[in-house]
Image (cartoon, rainbow, N blue to C red):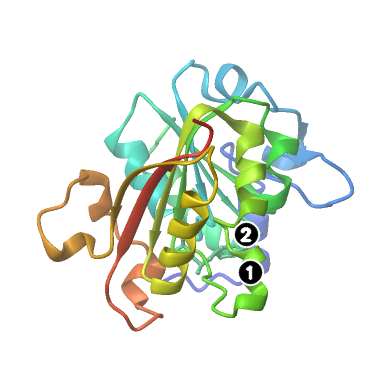
Amino acid sequence: MSTRNKLQKFAELLELPHVFENFSYENPELVGQYGKVVDLKSRWKNEHFGNLNPMILELACGRGEYTVALAEQYPDSNFIGVDIKGARIWQGARQVSDKNLRNAAFLRTKIELLDRFFASEEVDEIWITFPDPFLKDSKSTRRLTSPFFLEIYRKVLKPGGIVHLKTDSPILFDFTMEVISSDERCRLIYSSEDIYARALDFEELHIQTYYEAKNISGSGVSKYIRFAING
Ligand SMILES: C[S@@+](CC[C@H](N)C(=O)[O-])C[C@H]1O[C@@H](n2cnc3c(N)ncnc32)[C@H](O)[C@@H]1O
């Protein structure tokens, strides 16, 4: 366990070539290594990753377990973990350095601002890993699979782009299934209310995040929904 405090972690993030941060919601500017201002919208593949491989986001990535593990597992795709909390991103960003992964990056910003940093159709898939479920109905618009957020994803996902939700919250699972069934542009591809009840249908589901391991909901049961949001 590191003894670095938050300020040390924030300073280290600025030294990493695969971490980009937006410090002001009023200014759509991205700051990269050593504080250099960069514009990567529509240029992530060419200018940052140096390839034309598919690009997959992990939203609410926290420490970025999916970003790191998927990047190792799929070297021919690019992965970007997105979260607002720098001290959490730092954990995954350090691993990307240690493992010398060229196909993984982190973006520190609010998910609400995604289309400032990604162009239309620039993103192939989105993973949402154990997001806050916002249990009260009055806060349901803040859930990351609410219609409000799906509209944001539509702005950056390619047509037919896929969204993966992994959660242990029955409320978020049911809510998401309802959102999908009441939106004619959504198409459910797969769902499971207990992915570990039998052999995994998708190998990626074995990746455990920090919050999954913490079992905050107390259900101890991980659920998964895969759906397309445009077609
Ligand atoms: C419950 S944690 C899950 C973290 C990680 N995926 C895991 O499973 O361990 C939710 C994460 O979402 C991030 N988050 C919540 N709302 C956000 C938003 N609007 N924009 C960016 N990050 C957000 C928080 O900072 C936090 O790290």
- Picture quadrant of residue 106: top right
Viewer can see residue 81? yes
What residue is drawn where x is 32% and y is 72%? Answer: 213
As drawn, 44 above or below 220: above
Q: Between residues 20 and 16, which one lies in front from this camera angle?
A: 20
Q: Where in the image, quadrant-wise, is ligand 1 located?
A: bottom right
Q: Between residues 87 and 100, which one lies in front from this camera angle?
A: 87
As drawn, 87 above or below 17: below
Residue type at mark 1: give it.
Lys
As drawn, 190 above or below 51: below
For disc 1, the marked residue is 6
Asked if marks 2 and 1 touch (Cβ < 8 Å), the reply is yes
Dot 1 alpha-carbon crowd within 10 angstroms: few under 14, some 14 to 19, many 20 or more: few
The circle drawn on residue 153 is none
Residue 9 percent coordinates (x, y): 60, 61
What residue is drawn where x is 68% and y is 42%? Answer: 114
Locate residue 61 relative to residue 115 in the image: left or right: left
Instruction: Farthest residue to the left: give it.
Output: 199
Residue 132 percent coordinates (x, y): 53, 69
Residue 47 percent coordinates (x, y): 62, 19
Q: Between residues 53 and 33, which one lies in front from this camera angle?
A: 53
For disc 2, the marked residue is 86
Locate residue 26 relative to residue 131 in the image: left or right: right
From mark 2 to mark 1, how far is it between C-alphas?
Answer: 8 Å
Residue type at mark 2: give it.
Gly
Viewer can see residue 109? no
